[in-house]
Image (tube, rainbow, N blue to C red):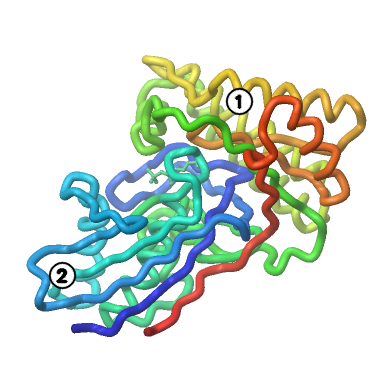
Amino acid sequence: MSKIVIAKAHTNIALVKYWGKKDPKLMLPQNGSISLTLDHFYTETSVQFSTHASEDQITFNDTQLSPVKAQRIVKFLDLIRAKSGQSARAIVKTRNHVPTSAGLASSASGFAALAAAGSRAAGLKLSLTDLSRLARRGSGSATRSIFGGFVEWHAGEDDLSSYAEPLQDPVDWDIQMIAVVLKATKKPISSTAGMQRVVATSPYYPAWVQTANRDLIAMRQAIADRDLTAVGTLAETNAMRMHALNLSAQPAFNYFTAETLTTINAVQDLRAQGINCYYTLDAGPNVKIICASKDTKAITTALQRHFRADQLIIAQPGPGISITEA
Ligand code: DP6
């Protein structure tokens, strides 16, 4: 039996998005991305390797995963076994403090926590950079969840050069995200398959890569300047360009619901009234609103015309990975 290692990783929301791979096997992205790690949503995972287990046992929020659902995690554990020389099967217990499959990027915190707990339990002692590279192999967005605050994932050219690093942590100025948790719907297409279709079929894809690279430069500056208006404007434009790729794919798809559009319109109305707020959204219907703390009351009050108070979760910049040995 190996020791039990527990890791906690927070989710992150991309301000300049990752949406397309140039190498699906190594999970190398087409462009770099920048995110903010959030305090409110996280995954806690414990891993122990046991020679008594005949196969990997994965429990997710107290329910054991079926072999089909466990596949992606088993593949990732195989990668850890190959790197460490650990040959035993693993007992993995994971608890998600994130609404799953709702575009709140549970695979980001999930694979970051699994990379950290799994590698340490297997006897590896990886640097944060190497942990970020390992997490990338599970899910692209997990690359960034190793770190807290504002984080940049460098696209890189190969396994060694594709990793994330902190841009600003702790975040010493006032930026918040209100997560608007909308009615859970079944995703029309997973992020992995969606981005693959976009790369293969959208005639606008080359323009996306070009503008995303420009957005990276501008976003770094906006974060260094602690300029909420610039961060919000860039994030909103970048998010809509990502979703425009989906509308331009063959066949087209989108992650919006009627409530998504209601929220987007509400944010635009609030801005027209002079409240400095912006929206972003990922591969799901939920909208995240970027704002300063002085405005959260006005924004949540306005949104309560459409949604319940418990659908509006105010999150702040969160920390990087933490690892403990039981
Ligand atoms: C829209 O990281 O879920 O959230 O690498 O295939 O697991 P895989 O995809 P995933 O994609 C996240 C896409 C996004 C944008 C982002 O987080 O940068």
Q: Name the secondary structure under disc 2.
A: strand
Q: Name the secondary structure under disc 1.
A: helix
Query: Badge 2: few (under 14), some or many (20 or more) residues near its Cα, within 10 Å?
Result: many
Q: Earlier in the sequence, mark 2 or mark 1?
A: 2
Spot the residue most to the right. Answer: 274
Asked if marks 2 and 1 touch (Cβ < 8 Å), the reply is no
What's under tag 1, amino acid-wise? Thr
Left or right, residue 180 beside residue 25: right
Q: Could you say which disc has been placed on residue 260 in the image?
A: 1
Q: Position of residue 256 (x, y in %)?
A: 54, 23
Residue in the picture at 48% in, 32% down: 184
Asked whether residue 257 appears in the rendered view, the answer is yes
In the picture, residue 257 is in which quadrant? top right
Asked whether residue 160 appears in the rendered view, the answer is no
Q: CA distance from mark 2 to mark 1?
A: 42 Å
What's under tag 2, amino acid-wise? Arg
In the picture, residue 291 is in which quadrant? top right
Residue in the picture at 48% in, 34% down: 283
For the N terminus, which image quadrant?
bottom left
- Quadrant for ligand 1 reads top left
Q: Position of residue 6 (x, y in %)?
A: 39, 75
Q: Could you say which disc has been placed on residue 166 in the image?
A: none
Compared to 285, does 231 lie above or below?
Answer: below
Compared to 97, does 49 lie above or below?
Answer: below
Q: Which residue is mark 2?
A: 89
